[in-house]
Amino acid sequence: MARPLRIDYPNAWHHVMNRGASKQLIFLNYDHRKMFLDLLNDVSQKFFVEIHAYCLMDNHYHLLVRTPESNLSQVMQYIDGVYTQQFNRCVKRDGALFRGRYKSILIEADAYLLQASRYIHLNPLEISFKEKFLDNKWSSYAAYIGLITPPEWLKNEFVLDMMHSKNPKESYENYVQQGVEPELIKFYSKKYQSTILGHATFKSQILQKLQKLNKTNQVEMKQDFKRTFSHFDITEILNSIARFYRKPTCQITQSQRGKQNMCRLLAIFICREVFGYSYKKISEKMGEISVNSLSSLIVRIKKMLATNEKLKNDYEMLLNYVKGKLGNDIVYKT
């Protein structure tokens, strides 16, 4: 499987996380957590990275960072590498501590930065009661709401300023206590998570820049680009296609022996090439079609669209209809 897409540029915002290998604990006591926070201080000075929020759980961590120097990879290599060395020395072990490379999500700051900070600060609620969450010493939440003085390396002013309030700390506390939006819960709970948290126009701008910068690496990056746009349920997509053709969805999803079902072919093409769904997922929905057959079909449909002007026009009308039904801000990649 290809590595996750790494996106960075000057002053980019990232939600960064990593977890212990096999879900093993990465913080066993106070000293380990203090070591990790000291590393955040180190990287803020060594790499000029800005730490805007953090949360240390027993077996994983979350960070909200901005990279003025476009050097997230170096920063995270330093944090995970040095912390692993220090942890191993403390407990007299060796080997990998983390499950692999860190995971990072690029954030559209204007639209989602506040939400991402709230998600990070509410992370302890996954495993503990609210009282424990409020007493948690190992997240930046206490500094955000004024319970403690923030360390020099914690840049909490930017997010607090987004509250546009005379009392931003109190406003932020009320904001966090409202809980995480269902949209964000759905985003973070996906098995194959997008590497960008933002509106479709923001995603399109970022991916267009990346494609220009990575022309020699487009094959490896192609599926990850598509995954960024797979935020609509495949059933919704198929239902909207069926409505366009004024047919029941079963006539789209079921094969008709001896007949070329163009509605079905275009549905397969859209699910794969526009929304980036895996062949396995499409096979599950379309029934009685193998992964190898789907791959051949996609090639065939591309040739048909390139040579058949009427079919191309029909396809564009269908795609515009689907976009209108699912959301006018969809950006598609065909």
Image (spheres, grey):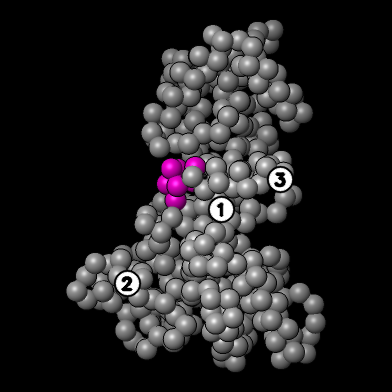
Give the labeled residue for mark 2.
160
- 227 above or below 121? above
As drawn, the label of residue 217 is: 3
Q: Position of residue 324 (x, y in %)?
A: 39, 28
Q: What stretch is highlighted in magenta?
A: 198-204
Tag on residue 112? none
216 inside magenta stretch: no
What is the distance, in whole Å, between disc 2 and disc 1 at their CAs?
25 Å
Q: Nearer the viewer, residue 56 or 63?
A: 63
Specify the amino acid type for callout 3.
Asn
State the SS at label 2. Answer: helix
Which quadrant of the structure image shows residue 222?
A: top right
Counting residues from the start of the chain, the first of labels 2 and 1 encountered is 2
Residue 131 in view of the camera: no
Please identify, in this view, whether the residue under mark 3 or under mark 2 is nearer the observer.
3
Amino acid type for the residue under numbered disc 2: Leu
Numbered badge on residue 195: 1
Q: Could you tell which of marks 3 and 1 lies nearer the N-terminus?
A: 1
Horizontal side of 70 relative to 25 (left or right) equals left
Q: Three-letter amino acid code at disc 1?
A: Thr
**Label 3 SS:** helix
Magenta stretch prevailing secondary structure: helix
Asked whether disc 3 touches disc 1, contact meaning CB atoms under 8 Å apart, the reply is no
